[in-house]
């Protein structure tokens, strides 16, 4: 099969490593089409399929020999590849092959394999912060967000719905959080103690959730800080006014209309979080078997993501 590209030339290091998770999303993964397009454009492409219970680092043992790594899968796959590539001189393309693909959404990635191949060939990238989560002595990387409480419960309930409803499963599971458990969170943010009551805490690096809706305003993935969001509301529906205000802020439509006390936000480059009651954890859609406490720190500019967007355009 012959592919004709749109006049792009191969990147200086035209070796491309494609890592893909065949179990992600609906299973209709187009990344192998993208790989063939890159070969037709003159790139040397190697593909590796991720295997269950095999660390992603095994597939990336020689990643520094490549100019670009393409990570195809859900957010968990992309963030684990990003963490393995931290501070290496290798570009990373987040190929949207999962259910929600929030990292790709925040990076303004297209879904068409030809357009994604063109991005690899163009080679434009931005340095993005990563988060490093530590729980019970284990470290994990995340690019989107880590959280405890309501968001982790929502992700857990969405698992059985995703095969049938796709991204809508997250909305449906959120609506089920009618009476989530509240607790008191004990936090230390950049050395400063904080206490807050709520149904959850999110430590966000990127700011857009499903369907491009902003979690809150002024979240930047390249400022060396997290935006920490404490969900003070009694249920998810009470957060709707805050969502409306965030959208208005994004569209420059004026001052907030509501300004309710349903959420509290602050910035921190390092944070530890404990709770009066153990709360479930998640990071980039991956549920953790452990519960609170946990800690997180920013790894500034740790990975170079391929994207057509400019750094300033990635802020909510």
Image (cartoon, helix red, strand yellow):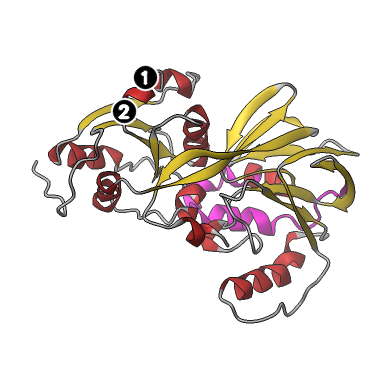
Q: Can residue 9 be seen in this view?
A: yes
In the visual, does 176 lie left or right of 310? right
**Do the residues bearing badges 2 and 1 touch, measured as CB atoms within 8 Å?**
yes
Residue name at image x 73 percent, y 65 percent:
239
Q: Where is residue 149 in the image (x, y as percent from the top left)?
A: 76, 45
Image height of 285 relative to 5, above or below: above
How packed mark 1 is, by other alpha carbons closer than 10 Å (few <14, some 14-19, many 20 or more), is few
Residue name at image x 25 percent, y 50 percent:
118
How packed mark 2 is, by other alpha carbons closer than 10 Å (few <14, some 14-19, many 20 or more), is some
Residue 221 counted in the magenta span? no
Residue 163 counted in the magenta span? yes
Q: Where is residue 1 in the image (x, y as percent from the top left)?
A: 9, 41
Residue 157 is drawn in which quadrant?
Answer: top right
Q: Position of residue 22 (x, y in %)?
A: 38, 33
In the picture, the disc for residue 62 is 1
In the picture, the disc for residue 66 is 2
Q: Is residue 100 visible?
A: no
Residue segment shown in magenta: 157-186
In the visual, does 202 lie left or right of 142? right
Residue name at image x 39 percent, y 51 percent:
307
Element type where label 1 sits in the image? loop
């Amino acid at each position: 099969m012959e592919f004709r590209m749109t006049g792009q030339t191969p990147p200086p290091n035209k070796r491309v490593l494609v890592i893909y998770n065949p179990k992600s999303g609906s299973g209709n993964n187009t990344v192998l089409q993208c790989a063939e397009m890159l070969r037709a454009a003159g790139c040397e492409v190697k593909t590796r399929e991720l295997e269950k219970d095999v660390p992603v680092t095994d597939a990336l043992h020689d990643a520094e020999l490549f100019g670009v790594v393409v990570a195809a899968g859900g957010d968990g796959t992309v963030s684990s590849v990003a963490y393995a590539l931290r501070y290496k001189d290798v570009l990373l393309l987040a190929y949207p092959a999962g259910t929600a693909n929030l990292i790709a959404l925040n990076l303004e990635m297209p879904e068409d394999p030809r357009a994604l191949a063109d991005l690899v060939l163009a080679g434009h990238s931005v340095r993005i912060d990563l988060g490093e989560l530590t729980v019970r002595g284990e470290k994990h990387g995340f690019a989107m967000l880590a959280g405890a409480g309501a968001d982790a419960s929502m992700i857990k309930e969405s698992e059985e719905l995703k095969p049938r409803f796709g991204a809508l499963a997250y909305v449906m599971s959120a609506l089920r959080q009618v009476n989530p458990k509240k607790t008191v969170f004990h936090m230390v943010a950049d050395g400063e103690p904080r206490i807050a009551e709520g149904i959850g805490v999110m430590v966000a690096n990127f700011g857009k959730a499903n369907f491009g809706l902003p979690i809150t305003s002024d979240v930047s993935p390249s400022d060396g800080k997290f935006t920490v969001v404490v969900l003070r509301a009694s249920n998810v529906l009470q957060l709707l006014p805050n969502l409306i205000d965030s959208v208005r802020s994004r569209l420059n439509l004026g001052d907030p209309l509501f300004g309710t006390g349903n959420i509290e936000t602050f910035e921190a480059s390092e944070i530890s979080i404990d709770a009066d009651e153990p709360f479930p954890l998640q990071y980039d859609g991956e549920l953790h078997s452990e519960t609170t406490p946990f800690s997180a720190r920013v790894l500034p500019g740790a990975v170079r993501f391929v994207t057509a967007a400019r750094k300033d355009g990635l802020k909510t």
